[in-house]
Image (cartoon, grey):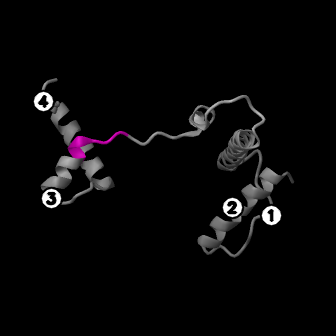
């Protein structure tokens, strides 16, 4: 069993414990279960990504790469924050909340869809 398969098996067993299943799995099915294959693939991709990040940081810290700012070397690993939805903030303001939670973003989406069905949309002043 490879290290990836061991990690997948540990995750499967963790879920079985959470579900209250007493029997632990002894192997991750390879051919019959698409979810198991997807789990193995996800772990493989995650391990490869961790190695890529580790190598980039190690190169920066060791000074073994030509001069480049950390921003340039690590930019590809930065996950951008989702854009702020001004309508979600307006809905939160309407209810007296200072910062919108996930429900406000959902409500803003539903409101935009309802308006679109009626041929309407909300635009910023000056657009």
Q: Which residue is mark 4?
A: 125
Query: What is the number of the mark on residue 55?
Result: none
Q: Which residue is mark 3?
A: 95
Is 121 above or below relative to 104?
above
Q: Is residue 41 left or right of residue 88?
A: right
Q: Nearer the viewer, mark 1 or mark 4?
A: 4
Q: Residue at x 70, y 66 (%)?
A: 13
Residue nearest the observer in this picture, 117 or 83:
83
**Disc 1 or 2, which lies upstream in sequence?**
2
Residue at mark 1 to residue at mark 4: CA–CA distance: 61 Å
Is 116 above or below relative to 38?
above
**Disc 2 or 4, which lies upstream in sequence?**
2
Q: Is residue 85 magenta?
A: yes
Query: What is the number of the mark on residue 12?
Result: 2
Q: Is residue 11 left or right of residue 5?
A: left
Q: Residues within 10 Å of mark 1 (few under 14, many from 20)?
A: few
Quarter of the image where one finds residue 87: top left
**Disc 3 or 4, which lies upstream in sequence?**
3
Q: Is residue 117 left or right of residue 15?
A: left
Q: Residue at x 22, y 48 (%)?
A: 89
**Disc 3 or 1, which lies upstream in sequence?**
1
Q: Which residue is mark 1?
A: 26
Quarter of the image where one finds residue 101: bottom left
Q: Residues within 10 Å of mark 3 (few under 14, many from 20)?
A: few
Residue at mark 3 to residue at mark 2: CA–CA distance: 43 Å
Callout 3 touching callout 4 (CB < 8 Å): no
Where residue 126 appears, x then y in whole percent? 13, 25
Q: Residue at x 46, y 39 (%)?
A: 80
Residue at mark 3 to residue at mark 1: CA–CA distance: 52 Å
Residue at mark 2 to residue at mark 4: CA–CA distance: 52 Å
Callout 3 touching callout 2 (CB < 8 Å): no
């Amino acid at each position: 069993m490879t290290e990836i398969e061991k990690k997948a098996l540990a995750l499967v067993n963790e879920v079985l414990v959470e579900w209250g299943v007493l029997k632990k799995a002894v192997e991750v099915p390879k051919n019959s279960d698409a979810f198991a294959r997807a789990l193995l693939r996800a772990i493989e991709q995650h391990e490869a990504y961790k190695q890529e990040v580790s190598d980039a940081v190690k190169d920066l810290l060791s000074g073994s790469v030509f001069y480049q700012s950390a921003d340039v070397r690590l930019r590809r690993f930065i996950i951008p924050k989702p854009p702020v939805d001004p309508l979600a903030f307006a809905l939160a303001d309407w209810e007296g909340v200072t910062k919108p939670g996930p429900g406000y973003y959902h409500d803003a989406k539903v409101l935009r869809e309802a308006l679109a069905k009626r041929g309407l949309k909300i635009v910023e002043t000056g657009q």
